[in-house]
Amino acid sequence: MKKPLKIGVTDTFNARYEDYLDWLRHFNPEIHFIKLSHREQNILAVDDTDGVLLTGGADLDPTLFHVEDPKSLARNIDHERDLFELALTHRLLHKSLPLLAICRGLQVVNVALRGTLILDLPTAGYHDHTNQNDYGLAHRVTVRPNTLLSDLTNRASLEVNTSHHQAIDKLGRGLIATALSPDGVIEAVEWEDRTEKPFFSLVQWHPERMLGTPDNTASRTLAEAFLLAASDRRLAHEK
């Protein structure tokens, strides 16, 4: 009997967590999910997964990327979650697990790889990328050609949804920007040398809760490619 895929998903500590599970279940209803959380202190559980999804949530503590925040521009910091997910990122990268990171997840990976973040987009002179409705702020992004994202979507631009007031400033080591908003904010990132990673896609938008999900190209293609990479890894390790 074929074993179900095991996908690790970081805890959001709110009802949004189920959005990520429902989204992936649409493409594979047999997935076994493993919640990864500092409350469970189960970082070693990542070793038993076929791929990992890093979810959205609160801002990272600016001191983790060596930025003082005297005006408290960061919101709802959970320092224990930050430390857990940074350590988790290093572990899954070492094991070359397929990785899909969404919103905060993108920022976690960037910081783990010694990148930095813009603390507040409007304060830094960018447009506000947040919206309080269920879907987020709709806008277009330009996709960099000859990248994993362009190969998956076959598009030069995408309509996406965002809900973030922070964003990547300096890219982490080994990363390249693969999508930009009209005001120049980095909205997607991947590994520069694609041959080094089985699947590695970081997006600032929310594919799990965008209009037209799961048929929207910016949603469907990410889920399908991530789960295919996880399945390939499972098969390779079963041989």
Image (cartoon, helix red, strand yellow):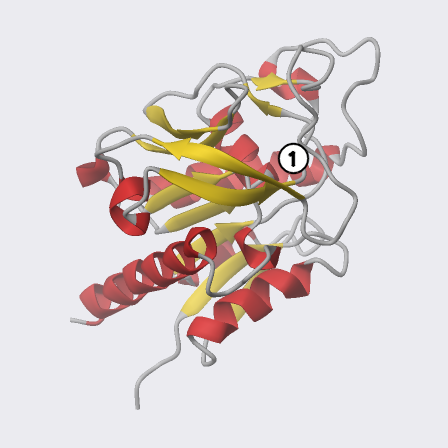
Q: Is residue 153 above or below residue 70?
A: below
The quadrant holding residue 107 is top right
Task: Tell me what residue is drawn at x 53 percent, y 53 percent.
Answer: 207
- Residue 209 coordinates in the image, percent (x, y): 61, 57
Q: Nearer the viewer, residue 45 or 27?
A: 27
Q: Secondary structure at mark 1?
A: helix
Q: Nearer the viewer, residue 92 or 41?
A: 92
Q: Is residue 126 above or below residue 51?
A: above
- Residue 195 coordinates in the image, percent (x, y): 17, 39
The answer to whether any part of residue 165 appears in the image is yes
Which amino acid is tagged 1?
Asp
Quadrant of the drawing holding the C terminus: bottom left
Answer with left or right where residue 226 lies relative to residue 237.
Answer: right
- Residue 100 coordinates in the image, percent (x, y): 44, 48
Q: Residue furthest bottom?
A: 1
The residue beneath circle 1 is 82
The quadrant holding residue 27 is bottom left
Task: Tell me what residue is drawn at x 29 percent, y 50 percent.
Answer: 152
The answer to whether any part of residue 32 appears in the image is no
Q: Nearer the viewer, residue 164 or 157?
A: 157
Q: Is residue 33 above or below residue 76?
A: below
Quadrant of the drawing holding the N terminus: bottom left
- Residue 151 coordinates in the image, percent (x, y): 24, 45
Answer with left or right where residue 229 lies relative to residue 62.
Answer: left
Q: Residue furthest right?
A: 71
Answer with left or right where residue 46 lies relative to residue 144.
Answer: right
| Count of numbered circles in the view | 1
Crowding at mark 1 (Cα within 10 Å: few <14, some 14-19, many 20+): some
Task: Tell me what residue is drawn at x 50 percent, y 44 percent.
Answer: 159
